């Protein structure tokens, strides 16, 4: 049953004074509860599209409906931003308060949420991202990675229906990266929050329900990770890569090992190899 | 020895409620011509450590030696140190500020009071070396893509002709093609005789590039050794916020499942060979 939460019809966006649009004729639908990853080379328009979803930018052409609403007025924009939270690439641009927990509470305070509800949600969100110990610390004392986790907590506290993560794991260590990714997956599975996950890590993309690959403002490829990554030549031409395990699988196949197509993760590879043991 | 760090301590905002012990007695040495990797959880002190390596920060107690020179010495020639050590910060593209790429790259060498022709020569050489087209020289850095801007920032450091190059997460935020190009650029710089120290969160990247790794954990060196030696400690690394490369994960997993795979393998080709060997296909066709 179709229940679209993001509907884009020929969406275009051109920055002022730019020679060409950054987002060009993008038409796509994201179903409520989906976990969609967006890939694409630097400058392909991913962050621009993310800001359109969040009504930080408004389309210069086409129509974009987020959670049933097309942002036309200022009020619409606030409504869209409440239902579609966003975690940016650079945490320094979104940390506003001088104490971690105040930063997380910022959005809720603006909405006039009761203090005890703010307290509960902020504590929970900080615990979720592993920053509860630093609740009283100053964000300026945190390293880049720690700030990023605080930013994630701030958005989580808003309990939006959609969360767009724009390379939110780019500055994290491997465990932090997996924690935030798993957090997004858990929110997706257990609370049905729709996730738009922008990333340059193919291993993360492999675990999404669906991939959208952008190139020069357009959606160049779309489909299940297995289908998309199977087009190795296209993927490489688009400035991307395939997951490490797919490369190893190809190498093993060339050496005569009979492995099925579409192995993307260490788990899948281990299971298949154990069958041959 | 290009770099020697002895019992380095760094405390941010001492005596305040925000006091942070970022480095708690770190000692390490980087040998001539080495490619060293520094890994560690976020906040483990990596950026703090490398900011000490060209005298930007001072340590009490502890000492940092660059090419045998004690940076804590009153008479230390910090200009010579900054010439020897090229430091590329995290997200260095945010520090570009000149109106053209060429001017940005020339900024460092201009401060060295070199003749104009020498500066020009170094600038065009550095721009070529980082794989940028010479035609970008007259463009504004702000018209370039993220990966291109990163290269401009690195070119600015290379134009100083450092004998030691230190990079803080040089591939962070780049697309996979940009990441591959950046790493091959750094490897080329290393192959031409420069000592390299690279901070990274990518276990695959440091595994591929580095001769030796130092693992920072809460401001202390937890492990050091070749990547193969360090990646043996997969569980301990995990406890420190780190990981091992994908192929090492697979090798460890298969070993637990009863595969006969030697320890310490993490490269794709060696893990592939070990799997083929175990499956009895080893002799058939080498990886
Ligand atoms: N504020 C801006 N003003 C003008 N042009 C911009 C602005 N922001 C981005 N652009 C341009 O729009 C295009 C798309 O940029 P965008 O940031 O959306 O790419 P991206 O896919 O997110 O890249 P990355 O992987 O580097 O984050 C690029 O050509 C970029 O230079
Ligand atoms: N300017 C500062 N003032 C106070 N404390 C700081 C400052 N910069 C860093 N710290 C603290 O020092 C410790 C080490 O930080 P550092 O930035 O060196 O870590 P890092 O390993 O580079 O982290 P990342 O992987 O996130 O870049 C952290 O606990 C951090 O909170
Ligand atoms: Mg972006
Ligand atoms: Mg750092």
Image: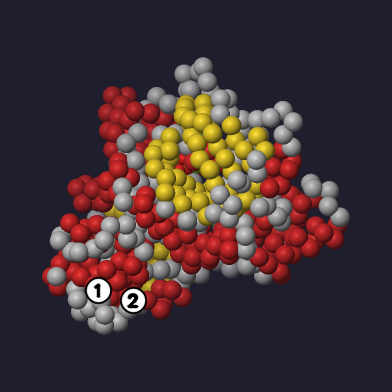
Instruction: Name the element at disc 1.
Output: helix
> Where A81 falls versus A236 (above or below)?
above
Tell me which residue sits at (15%, 61%) in the image: B258
Q: Quadrant of the N terminus of chain A?
A: bottom left
Question: What chain is tagged by disc 2?
Answer: B
Q: Nearer the viewer, residue A264 or B45?
A: B45
Residue A152 shows up from this direction = no
Tell me which residue sits at (55%, 62%) in the image: B187
Q: Nearer the viewer, residue A265 or B196?
A: B196
User: Residue A94: percent from the left, percent from the top?
Assistant: 48, 40
User: Residue B286: percent from the left, percent from the top?
Assistant: 32, 78
> Real-space Cα distance between discs 2 and 1?
9 Å
Q: Which residue is mark 2?
A: B287
Q: Quadrant of the C terminus of chain A?
A: bottom left
Q: Are marks 2 and 1 in contact (CB under 8 Å)?
A: yes
Q: Nearer the viewer, residue B137 or B66?
A: B66
User: Residue A221: percent from the left, percent from the top?
Assistant: 38, 73
Q: Which mark is residue B276?
A: 1
> Where A206 falls versus B71 (above or below)?
below
Instruction: Name the element at disc 2.
Output: loop
Residue A252 shows up from this direction = yes
Q: Which mark is residue B138?
A: none
The quarter of the picture where residue A136 lies is top left
Question: What chain is tagged by disc 1?
Answer: B
Tell me which residue sits at (30%, 30%) in the image: A123
A42 on left or right of B195: left
Q: Nearer the viewer, residue B243 or A168?
A: B243
B78 on left or right of B151: right
User: Residue B165: percent from the left, percent from the top?
Assistant: 61, 52
The number of numbered badges drawn on the structure is 2
Neighbour tally class for label 1: few under 14, some 14-19, many 20 plus, Cα within 10 Å: many
* For marks 2 and 1 on the same chain, the one whose residue lies earlier in the sequence: 1
């Amino acid at each position: 049953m179709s229940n679209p939460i993001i509907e884009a019809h020929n969406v275009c966006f051109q920055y002022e004074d730019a020679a060409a649009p950054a987002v060009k004729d993008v038409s796509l639908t994201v179903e409520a509860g989906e976990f969609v990853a967006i890939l694409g080379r630097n400058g392909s328009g991913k962050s621009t599209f993310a800001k359109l979803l969040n009504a930080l930018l408004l389309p210069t052409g086409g129509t974009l409906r987020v959670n049933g609403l097309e942002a036309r007025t200022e009020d619409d924009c606030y409504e869209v931003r409440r239902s579609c939270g966003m975690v940016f690439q650079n945490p320094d641009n979104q940390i506003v308060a001088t104490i971690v927990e105040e930063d997380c509470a910022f959005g809720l305070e603006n909405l006039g949420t009761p203090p005890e509800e703010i307290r509960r949600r902020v504590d929970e969100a900080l615990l979720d991202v592993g920053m509860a110990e630093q609740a009283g610390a100053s964000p300026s004392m945190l390293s880049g990675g720690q700030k990023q986790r605080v930013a994630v907590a701030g958005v989580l506290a808003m309990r939006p229906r959609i969360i767009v993560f724009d390379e939110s794991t780019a500055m994290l260590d491997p465990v932090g990266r997996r924690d935030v990714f798993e957090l997004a997956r858990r929110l997706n599975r257990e609370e049905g929050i729709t996730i738009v996950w922008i990333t340059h890590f193919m291993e993360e993309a492999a675990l999404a329900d669906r991939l959208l690959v952008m190139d020069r403002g357009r959606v160049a490829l779309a489909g299940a990770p297995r289908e998309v990554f199977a087009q190795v030549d296209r993927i490489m031409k688009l400035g991307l890569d395939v997951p490490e395990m797919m490369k190893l699988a190809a190498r093993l196949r060339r050496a005569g090992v009979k492995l099925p197509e579409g192995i993307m993760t260490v788990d899948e590879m281990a299971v298949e190899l154990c069958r041959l043991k | 020895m290009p770099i020697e760090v002895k019992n380095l301590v760094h405390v941010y905002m001492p005596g305040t409620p925000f006091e942070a012990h970022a480095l708690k007695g770190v000692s390490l040495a980087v040998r001539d011509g080495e490619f060293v990797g520094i890994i560690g959880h976020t906040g483990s002190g990596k950026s703090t450590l490398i900011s000490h390596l060209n005298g930007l920060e001072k340590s009490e107690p502890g000492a940092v030696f660059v090419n045998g020179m004690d940076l804590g010495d009153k008479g230390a020639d910090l200009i010579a140190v900054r010439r020897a050590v090229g430091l590329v910060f995290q997200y260095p593209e945010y520090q570009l500020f000149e109106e053209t790429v060429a001017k940005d790259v020339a900024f460092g060498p201009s401060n060295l009071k070199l003749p104009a022709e020498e500066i020009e020569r170094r600038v065009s050489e550095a721009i070529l070396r980082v794989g940028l087209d010479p035609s970008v020289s007259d463009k504004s850095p702000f018209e370039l893509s993220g990966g291109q801007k990163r290269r401009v920032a690195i070119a600015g450091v290379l134009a100083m002709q450092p004998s030691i190059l230190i990079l803080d997460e040089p591939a962070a935020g780049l697309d996979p093609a940009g990441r591959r190009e950046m790493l091959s650029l750094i490897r080329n710089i290393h192959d031409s005789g420069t000592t390299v120290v690279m901070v990274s969160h990518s276990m695959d990247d440091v595994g591929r590039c580095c001769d030796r790794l130092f693992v920072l954990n809460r401001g202390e060196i937890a492990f050091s050794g070749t990547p193969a030696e360090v990646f043996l400690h997969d569980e301990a690394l995990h406890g420190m916020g780190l990981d091992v490369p994908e192929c090492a994960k697979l090798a460890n997993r298969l070993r637990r499942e009863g595969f006969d795979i030697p320890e310490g393998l993490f490269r794709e080709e060696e893990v592939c060979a070990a799997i083929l060997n175990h499956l009895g296909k080893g002799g058939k066709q080498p990886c």
